[in-house]
Image (spheres, grey):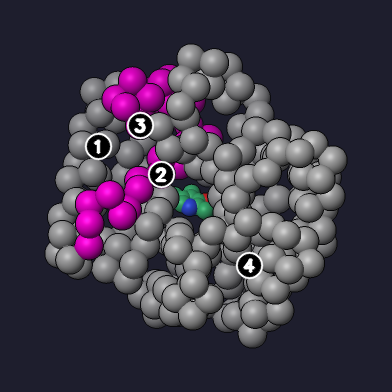
Amino acid sequence: MKNEILRNLESVRARVDCAVRASGRFPESVRVMAVSKTQPEESLRAALSAGQRLFGENRVQEACARWPTLRTEYPDVSLHLIGPLQTNKVRSALALFDCIQTLDRPELARTLAGEMARTGRRIPFLIQVNTAQESQKHGIRPADFPDFLRLCQDTYGLDIAGLMTIPPLNVPPVPCFSQLAGMAKAYGLPELSMGMSGDFESAIACGATYVRIGTALFGGRVSV
Ligand SMILES: *Cc1c(COP(=O)(O)O)cnc(C)c1O
């Protein structure tokens, strides 16, 4: 399995490189995030020993159970939360993650601001946008985005580094990627987290700066 993950990692990096060049961008402008949700620790270790340092986790509890130990061995790991965040998990999420990509509602922004004021620990955020405009549970609707961004930045003083989206499986992703890129550009936000195993090349063509790769690196996973 270790060799397989190493091979997958090399192949994903090569494909990312190719897509970056094809769109005339700089190689360093796109970072590959390994999405390690539900993967066994040995898979994480295989990716770590292959040099991967950027990881995304979906669940605060699962991440809190395994990353503090791994981090003592790999202190340069960067860990992002890419799953929904409940306000009662804000404290542990802020203590563990280097970036939270799923900021999507005023109540969460307020709780995060309060907790950061209490602890003095500050991290950057991405705002999750519901680009598909349908009954997606998570993500701020594009129409509500300008007010929400102002609230996060001006009222709560949050460091908003960029935007993130997860197009639902039943819609073509490219219009979602383009819309997200347009919004980020309009508001001067540099980071764009979009693209997964099945569509990261088109996300890169649309300007992704983070691609979130699970199955193409680790193989299938137990469903969440
Ligand atoms: C699971 C997940 C991914 C990775 O998906 P793959 O198709 O396995 O690459 C990316 N982003 C989020 C938010 C996820 O939940």
Q: Name the kind of residue labelled 4 in the image.
A: Gly
Q: Is residue 183 left or right of residue 63?
A: left
* Disc 2 C-beta below 8 A from ligand 1: yes
Checking the image for residue 8, the label placed there is 1
Residue 22 quadrant: bottom left
Mark 1: secondary structure:
helix
The alpha-carbon separation of the residues under discs 3 and 2 comes to 8 Å
Q: Nearer the viewer, mark 1 or mark 2?
A: 2
Does the magenta portion include 21? no
Span of residues in magenta: 25-52
Real-space CA distance between mark 1 and mark 2, rounded to the nearest whole angstrom: 13 Å
Residue depicted at x 58% and y 46%: 99
Q: Residue 195 sits in which quadrant?
A: bottom left
Q: Quadrant of the C terminus?
A: top right
Point 23% across, 43% down: residue: 13
- Front label number (3 vs 4): 3
- 3D distance between C-alphas at marks 3 and 4: 28 Å
State how far apart marks 3 and 1 are (Cα): 12 Å
Nearer to the camera, 5 or 208: 208
Query: Which structural element holds mark 3?
Result: loop
Direction from residue 151 to residue 70 in the image, left or right: left
The answer to whether residue 102 shows anywhere in this view is no
Q: Are marks 3 and 4 in contact (CB under 8 Å)?
A: no
Earlier in the chain: of badge 4 and badge 1, it is 1
Residue type (three-letter) at the residue carrying disc 3: Gln
Q: Which residue is mark 3?
A: 52
- Is residue 35 magenta-colored? yes
Q: Which residue is mark 4?
A: 139
Distance Cα–Cα, label 4 vs label 1: 30 Å
Q: Which residue carries the number 2 mark?
A: 33
Label 4: state its secondary structure. Answer: loop
